[in-house]
Amino acid sequence: MPWARFESSKQFEQLVSTLRVLKSSHTMTKSSPECIFCKIVAGQIPSQKVFEDADTLAFLDIKPVNNGHTLVIPKIHVPYFYDLDNKNYAKLMQTVKNVSRAIEHAVKPAKVGLLVKGFDVDHAHIHVIPLNNNADIQATTFSPTDKQLAETAENLRKGIK
């Protein structure tokens, strides 16, 4: 058991929680000089802005899946959206919701989908994508066994606090 050196599993969980907070505060910075999204926030690189407030920015993707494909980012630099503190996460998702509604009214797709990848740019961002059919976002299929599904579910449950 990972908490064997602690008086209780609760003490171990408190330490893990504290470490997560420290990691988040360490990775959240005002900006990163090499980050293309930070340069867009600073106005050093042009973009087609859709929405901007004090904490978030939404702009059109330059390689869209469909017309209206928008990226929503926090203005602070953080590599992973799940490392945002609760306040900034809520603000990001509120902007995602507002942009989704705007896409629904302006572009009139069958659905509006969300995608979080993060491989191209090391700055948290959510893709808000107008979708007209299932083929708009095609992924390879993973066919797990029942045992694999059960093991994965158990591992995920352990990580959720």
Image: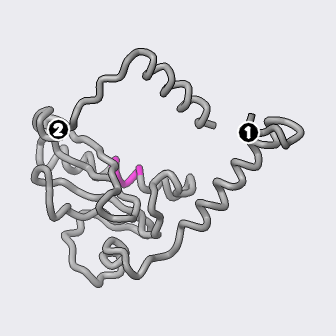
Quarter residue 132 falls in: top left
- The amino acid on which the numbered mark 1 sits, given as a three-letter code, is Pro
Q: Position of residue 80 (x, y in %)?
A: 45, 57
Quarter residue 74 falls in: bottom left
147 vs 161, left or right, is left
Looking at the image, which residue is at 70% across and 48% down?
16
Vertical position of residue 74 compared to residue 81: above or below: below
Task: Single out the residue that lies furthest toward the bottom.
Answer: 44
Q: Position of residue 59 (x, y in %)?
A: 24, 64
Q: Name the residue under label 2.
A: 138
Q: Is mark 2 on a helix, strand or loop?
A: loop
Per the rendering, the mark at residue 2 is: 1
Vertical position of residue 144 compared to residue 158: above or below: above
- Does the magenta-highlighted stretch encompass residue 43? no
Which region shows up in magenta? 93-97
Main SS, magenta region, reads: helix
The residue nearer to you, when weighing 115 against 11, is 11
Q: What element carries label 1?
A: loop
